[in-house]
Amino acid sequence: MIDRDQRLPITRQARLLGLARSSVYYRPVDTGEADLKLMAAIDLVHTELPFYGSRRIRGELLGRGFVVGRGHVATLMRRMGISAIAPKRRTSKPAPGHKIYPYLLRGLDITSAGQVWCADVTYLPMARGFCYLVAVMDWASRRVLSWRLSNTLDASFCIEALEEALERYEAPRVFNTDQGAQFTCEGFTSVLAGHGVAISMDGRGRWLDNVFIERLWRSVKHEEVYLKAYENLTEARRELAAYFEFYNRRRRHQGLNDRTPDEVYWSTLRRQPRAA
C-alpha cells in the first residue's frame, strides 16, 4: 500500500491509510546465528523431555554449555510455538473469538482406518534457519496422509495439508487437533464442516489426547531431521518426502504388532479412498 517512489511523503501516505508511521518504517530482523543455535538446542531438549518448561529447559541448556537466561528461553519457545506438555492453565492459545470444540475421542474404540484423523504442527531446525511442519495422520494406522512445510505459523499451510488429504481420501468421521490458532480458525474448521466431519479438540494441558502424532514428531526428528540439518526448505521437502514414504511403507511399529502403517491402513480401511 505504501509506495516509496511516490512524491507524496511516506508520513502523509501512512496518515491517509490510517497506519502508524513506526509500522511503515519497521524492517523485520532475521534471527541471529546464536538464537538459531539456541532454538535448535531447545527443540532437541523439548523433543527428548516434552514435559520440561522454560525453567528446566534453561537448566539443560546450561549443562550443555549455553549461557542463557530463562526469559530468553521463554521468548524463543513462544517464537517456535512450543510449550511444556503438562497440565497447566493454558497449553494452546486459540485466537480470540475462535470456537473451541469438545474432545470426542474419550471412550471411543478406534480400530479401523478412516475412522479418526488427527493433525499437529511442529518446529524443525535447519542448518540456516527453521521452518514448521504440519501432518495429517490416520489415528488407527499411524499412516501420514499429507503434510506441508512453512516458514511461518499461519493457518494456510495447515489448510492446504487438510485439503490434500480430503482430496485423496474419503473424509473421516472425526478429526482431532489441539486448540492452536491454526486449527481453530474459520478457514480450517469450515473445510471439515463442509465435509461433514465431527471436529474434536484436545483439552487444555492434555497432550495425551493427541499422543500418536506427538510420537510421530519424535520419530521424524530423531530418525531424520537431526541427522541431516537441512540447508533450506527445498532440501527439507525432498528429504521429508522420502522419509514419510519410508515411514508409511517400511517402518514397523511395536504398537501395531510390528506392522507398517500401510499394512494396517489398507487391511482395516472400511471405505475406499478417492485416489491412491
Image (spheres, rainbow, N blue to C red):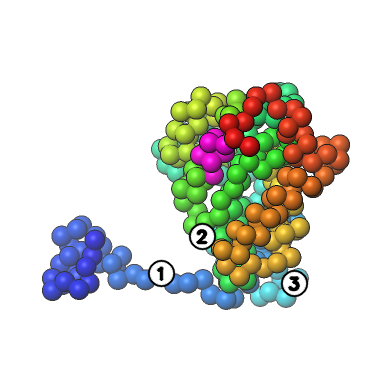
The residue beneath circle 2 is 151
- The tag earlier along the polypeptide, 2 or 1, is 1
**Amino acid type, mark 1:** Pro
Tag 1's secondary structure? loop
Q: Residue 54: percent from the left, percent from the top?
A: 64, 59
Residue nearer the viewer, 34 or 218: 218
Magenta stretch: dominant secondary structure: helix
Does the segment drawn in magenta span residue 17?
no
Location of residue 48 with respect to 160 vertically, above or below? below
213 sits left or right of 165 in the view = right
As displayed, is residue 246 above or below residue 177? Answer: below
Q: Which residue is mark 1?
A: 28
Q: Residue 1 appears in which quarter of the rendering?
A: bottom left
Query: Which residue is at 22% across, 72% downward?
Result: 4
Which numbered disc, 1 or 3, marks the residue closer to the eye? 1
Read off the magenta span: 161-168
For disc 3, the marked residue is 64
Disc 3 secondary structure class: loop
Among numbered discs 1 and 3, the one appearing first in the sequence? 1
Residue 162: percent from left, percent from top = 53, 40
In the rendered image, residue 189, in percent from the top left (x then y), is placed at 48, 34
Q: Mark 2 Cα within 10 Å, few/some/many (few <14, many 20+)?
A: some
How many numbered marks does the figure carry? 3
Could you tell me how far apart the alpha carbons at marks 2 and 1 are, in whole angstroms?
A: 14 Å
Task: Say which residue appears at 19% left-offset and 70% top-offset.
Answer: 10
Sequence order check, earlier mark of 3 and 2: 3
